[in-house]
Every structure is written in C-alpha cells, then in structure tokens.
Image (cartoon, rainbow, N blue to C red):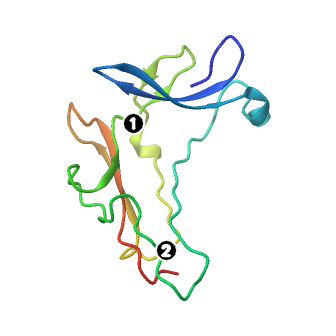
Amino acid sequence: MQEPQNGNWWLIVKDAKIGDIKIGYWPNELFTHLANNASVIRYGGIAGGYSTKKPTPPMGNGHLPNKDYRKACSLRTMKIVDDKGVLVDFDPSKIRGKQDTIKSCYDLEFDGYVDKEIELAMTFGGPGGMCP
C-alpha cells in the first residue's frame, strides 16, 4: 500500500489477531513509473539453480497446488487497496496465469473466492526436479 503523506510503498500482511504486519518498505523514488497508483499487480516466484544438469529445488513446501490449503503453499485473502486507501476485493475475471516451466515441476492455480475464511486465494508450488 502507498502512504498518502510521502508516497512510499509498504507490503503489509493483515492479521486478525495482531493487526498489521509490515513486511517490506520501498521509497517512492524507486517506483517513479507508478505515480500514485498501479494499473497491474503481479505475483511471482523463482525456484532454480545455476546448472541445467542438476535438479531444481522445491517451491513452497514442495506440493503441487491442489486446492488443499493445509498442504499446498497459498496466498489467501488477496485484496487490493483502492484510491481511498481501503482494502477491497479485486475482479477475479481479470486474473491471467502465466508460467515458464512444466506443470509437473511447478504450478499455480487461482481458485477465486473459496469461502469466508480464505476469501480470494491461489495455491502454488511444486517438487522441482529436472525442469527446463
């Protein structure tokens, strides 16, 4: 989220029990192309090595996505911050998935709205292996 006072950016996790957890901070000077908002949000991850002859490591906890939020890595209660600084749901129809490897190594699934506790969510990860 962007601080209205100075334009700096924060990555914040909302926790019902302990409140906001500040994960990361970026000065506004790093994001001159964003001005006062973002038109696209991207999530991504990398799990790899330096050699194509060795197996790549697991991503997340090593499980492929399977809609089981107890086993696969996940992002839950996904929200955006609107122009008033309020957390809101986004339009799930605008989600586009892209991946650069074979699905038996790593994968992702956007599940949309799951339930009241999980809300909008996706699962991701995989065992790695001999992956291009």
Q: Secondary structure at mark 1?
A: loop
Task: Find disc 1 in the rendering and name its residue.
Answer: 78
Residue 76 horizontal side relative to residue 67, left or right: right
Image height of 3 relative to 42, above or below: above
Q: Residue furthest top?
A: 5
Task: Find disc 2 in the rendering and name its residue.
Answer: 101
Total marks in image? 2
Residue 17 horizontal side relative to residue 87, left or right: left
Q: Secondary structure at mark 2?
A: loop
Task: Determine the residue positioned at 59% across, 82% down.
Answer: 51
* Comes first in the chain, label 1 or label 2: 1
| Disc marking residue 125 | none
Q: Label 1 neighbourhood size at 10 Å, few (<14), some (14-19), many (20+)?
A: some
Residue type at tag 1: Met
Task: Determine the residue positioned at 46% across, 57% down.
Answer: 97
Residue 8 in the image, given as x and y percentages of width and height: 68, 23
Q: Label 2 neighbourhood size at 10 Å, few (<14), some (14-19), many (20+)?
A: few
Residue 46 in the image, given as x and y percentages of width and height: 53, 62
Give residue 115's quadrant in the image: top left
Residue 72 horizontal side relative to residue 42, left or right: left
Image height of 6 relative to 116, above or below: above
Residue 82 in the image, given as x and y percentages of width and height: 52, 22
Task: Determine the residue positioned at 57% across, 85% down.
Answer: 52
> How far apart, in angstroms, are the residues tagged by discs 1 and 2?
24 Å
Residue type at tag 2: Thr
Front residue of this view, candidates 98 and 28: 28
Quadrant location, the N terminus: top right
Image height of 82 relative to 29, above or below: above
Image height of 131 relative to 85, above or below: below
